[in-house]
Amino acid sequence: MVKQEVNGKEKLTIAERAKIVRIRGIQNNDLPLIARWVADSETHGKLDFAPEPPKDWRNRTEVQAYISQFEDYYRNKNKDEDKNKDEDPKKITPLVAVNSMLEPASVLTIRWRGDPYVPKDKRIASIEAFMTDPELRHKGIGKQTLSAALDVIFYEYKGYSGEAAREARLWIFTDARAGDYSSNINFFRQYGFENLAGNWKEYVAKREIENVGDRDAMWFKLTKEKWEEIKLGNSKIAEHAPIDLLNLRI
């Protein structure tokens, strides 16, 4: 089979684009692509961080304003702060799964600190803004990304007074805008995530998240002990591409 060329380069097949070779930190040139993923209606309905996409993608000013919101998020900037000042980027660690052409295929954010809804000093990390390239859904990319994130959360990160996290938490939308949210719940449950009592509206108010206060979501948690139990029963669930730890903010 002869591959097509785009701008003088061979265009990868879907299978090749879905083959993850590395998990690394986020880069500025990833942001326009991630912004396009968020504009996908299915992705947009499942995310807690989901700025409204431009009405006209040909309008450079509108598009740049949209992308700048992702720059602020991934640098962990406070919306009321000086735009030239980072709040504390080490409070979060974005992970990006890339293919052999080093193209992003999935992204996930780990929040170590700064979530006022999570008890302080309990070594609890939060997972948020988890998405895959809409063209590459159901190819196992999300599984690798999450497995890598759990290794970072429970074993690699030592930012809690020299220790790793003891628990991971996340929210899953359960309203009409989220579509088939049951598949999302089942996805995380296979990793050992369990329901946790939580009030989405209280969470949104404390985090000051815009445009999602009228939605509904369920809170889930995973302990290190539960993750290790899951791995003992199914070692393949923990498989993932190598993590470029030197390139991560941990």
Image (cartoon, rainbow, N blue to C red):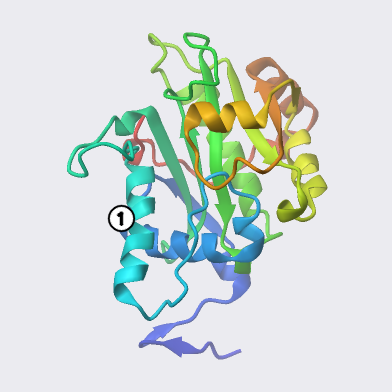
| Rendered image quadrant of residue 201 | top right
Percent across and percent down for residue 238 are: 65, 36
Say which amino acid is labelled 1: Asn
Front-most of 204 and 1?
A: 204
Secondary structure type for disc 1: helix
Q: Which residue is mark 1?
A: 28
Tell me: 21 left or right of 24: right
**Residue, x 69% and y 39% (percent of image)?**
172
Residue under the image location 39 percent in, 41 percent down: 244
Q: Position of residue 7 (x, y in %)?
A: 36, 87
Front residue of 111 and 8 = 111
- Most extreme residue toward the front is 214
Q: Nearer the viewer, residue 79 or 159?
A: 79
Q: Is residue 143 left or right of residue 34?
A: right
- Residue 234 vs 141, above or below: the answer is above
Give the quadrant of residue 17: bottom right
Q: How many marks?
A: 1
Q: Is residue 92 left or right of residue 233?
A: left
Question: Looking at the picture, how far across and down is residue 40, in whole percent?
Answer: 59, 66
Residue drawn 49% across the image and 30% down it:
207
Image position of 248 with respect to 197: above or below = below
